[in-house]
C-alpha cells in the first residue's frame, strides 16, 4: 500500500512513518538496585512533608496547614549531588494514639525500623515538647544515624531559638526552613555523607516489575487490596472515606509474580469542589496513573455502578493505560443484587467490554490470584506491536470487504497505515479524506477481533493528505 502515497503530498515527518518499520518508540526497563533509605519522622504538623517537597524540588507530598494530613509512609526517589536515595515521608507520631491515629503512628515506627538514617523534625518556634521527648526515646532504640532538624528557622534572627533543642540529647540541631529552603543544602550534605553505598534494610528493586495503579472511589477497598497483596499492614485502612492521600508504592508478590502496586486516594465526585488535602490528593492520584502501566479500577458490587465509577474508567482511557476491572466485596453479593449488577455492567460498561474482569474480596483475599492472569493479559496487549506489512494487509482486506460509505459523492480511501507506538497501541492511517467516527470504531473493533488487544485501549489517528498538483 506504500505505492498509494506516491501521488500525494507528504510532510517531512510523514516520511519517518512510512519506512520499512516505521518510527517506533521503544522502552527500557530499570536495573535492580537497593537505594539507601532516609525516613523523616516527627510529631504532627512540624513540616515533614514540606521538607520532603523541598528536598525533591517539587510539590509531591500533600501539604496543608492542619495536623494529620500525611497518614501512610510514602516513598519518593530523591537525588543530591549525584547520590540517589529513597526518601520516606511519614504521618505524625503521637503517644497513646487511638483509632486511625494509632495506625498512622505505627507506620512511622515501621519507617524507623526500615531505614538507614532518620531525620527527626522539630518545630523550633514551639520548642521541645513532651511528644518530641517520647519520639527521642523511640529513636534511641535504633543504632541508625539520627539528624535533629530544627524546622521553621526562616531567618538568622530565629537561629538562636534552635539551641533549646540541645536538651533533647540528640546532638547538634540543624536549623532549616523547609518553606524557604534555608539550611536544607547543608543538612543534606551531612545526611548523604552518613548513608551507606547500598541500603542495609531495603530490598533491591527487582528489574522491571510492572506498575499497577489501584483506582476507585473512596472506601471501595483499594488499601485493603494492597495490604492483602503485600501480606502486611502496609497502608492505613479505616472505615473513614478518604484515608489515603498520598500515592503509596509497594512491591508485592502474587502467584509467584512481582508487581509494583500503587495505592491511590479515592477519586471523589467533583474534584474542583474539593478543598485542601483532598484536592491535592486527587491531583496526586492522576499523576500516579500517568506513571503506571496498568490500572485496576475497583468497583464496589454492593452499590450501584455510579457516574463516579464511569468517570474513573474514562480517566484511565484518557491516560492510555491498560485496564482491569476488579469487582470488590464479591463475598457480600446476594442473588438479587447480582442480577442488577449484570444489567448495569452490560449497559454502563459496554464501552470497555474488552477489559478483563475479576471478582475479588480485598478483605479476605478471595480470588486475588486471579488478578495476575488479567494483569498479564492486559499488559501483553498494551505492549503488542503489529508489523507494518501485516497491518496494511489487514487494512486492505478490511477495506475490500467493507469500504467507507460515500459522503457527498466522494469516498475517502485509506492509502497506508502503520503502528507508530505501543503502550497503548497507536496507529496512523494516511487517508485521502476524513474517516467517519463510526468507521474508525469499526476498524478498532475488527483489530480486536483479529489481534485481541484485550485490556488495552487502541488509539487510531488520521493524516489526511491531498494529491499533488499536476504541473
Image (cartoon, rainbow, N blue to C red):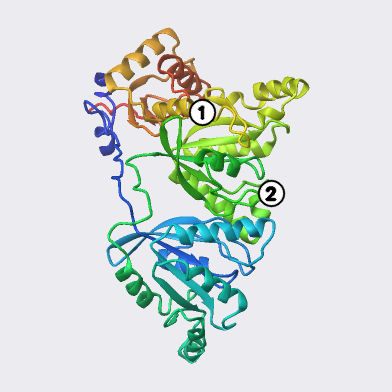
* 10 sits to left or right of 279: left
Observer-nearest of 111 and 441: 111
Task: Give the crowd class for mark 1: few <14, some 14-19, many >=20 residues within 10 Å.
Answer: some
Residue 35, placed above or below residue 44: above
Task: Give the crowd class for mark 2: few <14, some 14-19, many >=20 residues within 10 Å.
Answer: some
Which x, y percent locates residue 262? 49, 45
* 232 sits to left or right of 55: right
Q: Residue at x 34, y 39 (%)?
A: 208
Observer-nearest of 217 and 424: 217
Could you tell me which secondary element the residue under label 2 belongs to?
loop
Q: Residue at x 26, y 30 (%)?
A: 22
Which x, y percent locates residue 188? 36, 72
Residue 41, placed above or below residue 161: above
One can see residue 431 in this view: yes
Q: What residue did someone put label 2 on?
A: 241
Q: Nearer the viewer, mark 1 or mark 2?
A: 1
Residue at the right extreme of this rendering:
336
Mark number displayed over residue 355: none
One can see residue 411 in this view: no
Observer-nearest of 109 and 458: 109
Q: Earlier in the sequence, mark 1 or mark 2?
A: 2
Could you tell me which secondary element the residue under label 1 belongs to?
helix
Mark number displayed over residue 369: 1
Residue 267, placed above or below residue 193: above
Amino acid at each position: 500500500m506504500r505505492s498509494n502515497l506516491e501521488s500525494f503530498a507528504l510532510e517531512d515527518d510523514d516520511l519517518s512513518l512510512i519506512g520499512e518499520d516505521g518510527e517506533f518508540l521503544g522502552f527500557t526497563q530499570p536495573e535492580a538496585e537497593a537505594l539507601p533509605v532516609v525516613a523523616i519522622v516527627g510529631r504532627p504538623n512540624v513540616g515533614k512533608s514540606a521538607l520532603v517537597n523541598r528536598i525533591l524540588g517539587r510539590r509531591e507530598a500533600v501539604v496543608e496547614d492542619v495536623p494529620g494530613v500525611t497518614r501512610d509512609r510514602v516513598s519518593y526517589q530523591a537525588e543530591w549531588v549525584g547520590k540517589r536515595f529513597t526518601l520516606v515521608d511519614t504521618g505524625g507520631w503521637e503517644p497513646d494514639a487511638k483509632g486511625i491515629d494509632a495506625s498512622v503512628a505505627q507506620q512511622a515506627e515501621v519507617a524507623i525500623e526500615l531505614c538507614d538514617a532518620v531525620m527527626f523534625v522539630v518545630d523550633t518556634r514551639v520548642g521541645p515538647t513532651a511528644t518530641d521527648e517520647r519520639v527521642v526515646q523511640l529513636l534511641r532504640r535504633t543504632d541508625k544515624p539520627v539528624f535533629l532538624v530544627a524546622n521553621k528557622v526562616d531567618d538568622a534572627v530565629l537561629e538562636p531559638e534552635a539551641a533549646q533543642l540541645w536538651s533533647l540529647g540528640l546532638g547538634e540541631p540543624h536549623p532549616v526552613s523547609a518553606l524557604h529552603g534555608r539550611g536544607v543544602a547543608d543538612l543534606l550534605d551531612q545526611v548523604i555523607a552518613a548513608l551507606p553505598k547500598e541500603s542495609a534494610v531495603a530490598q533491591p528493586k527487582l528489574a522491571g516489575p510492572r506498575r499497577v495503579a489501584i483506582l476507585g472511589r473512596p472506601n471501595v477497598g483499594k488499601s485493603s487490596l494492597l495490604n492483602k497483596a503485600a501480606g502486611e499492614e502496609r497502608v492505613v485502612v479505616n472505615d473513614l472515606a478518604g484515608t489515603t492521600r498520598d500515592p503509596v508504592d509497594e512491591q508485592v508478590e502474587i502467584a509467584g509474580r512481582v508487581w509494583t502496586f500503587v495505592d491511590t486516594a479515592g477519586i471523589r465526585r467533583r474534584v474542583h469542589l474539593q478543598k485542601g488535602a483532598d484536592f491535592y490528593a486527587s491531583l496526586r492520584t492522576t499523576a500516579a496513573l500517568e506513571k503506571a502501566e496498568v490500572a485496576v479500577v475497583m468497583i464496589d458490587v454492593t452499590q450501584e455502578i455510579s457516574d463516579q465509577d464511569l468517570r474513573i474508567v474514562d480517566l484511565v482511557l484518557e491516560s492510555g493505560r491498560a485496564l482491569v476491572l476488579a469487582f470488590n466485596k464479591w463475598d457480600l453479593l446476594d442473588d438479587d443484587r447480582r442480577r442488577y449488577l449484570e444489567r448495569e455492567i452490560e449497559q454502563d460498561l459496554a464501552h470497555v467490554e474488552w477489559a478483563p474482569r475479576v471478582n475479588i474480596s480485598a478483605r479476605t483475599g478471595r480470588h486475588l490470584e486471579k488478578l495476575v492472569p488479567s494483569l498479564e493479559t492486559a499488559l501483553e496487549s498494551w505492549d503488542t506491536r503489529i508489523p507494518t506489512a501485516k497491518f496494511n494487509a489487514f487494512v486492505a482486506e478490511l477495506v475490500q470487504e467493507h469500504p467507507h460509505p460515500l459522503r457527498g459523492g466522494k469516498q475517502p480511501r485509506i492509502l497506508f497505515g502503520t503502528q507508530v507506538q505501543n503502550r497503548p497501541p497507536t496507529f496512523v492511517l494516511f487517508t485521502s479524506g476524513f474517516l467517519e467516527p463510526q468507521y474508525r470504531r469499526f476498524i478498532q473493533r475488527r483489530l480486536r477481533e483479529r489481534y485481541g488487544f484485550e485490556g488495552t485501549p487502541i488509539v487510531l489517528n488520521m493524516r489526511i493528505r491531498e494529491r499533488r498538483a499536476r504541473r
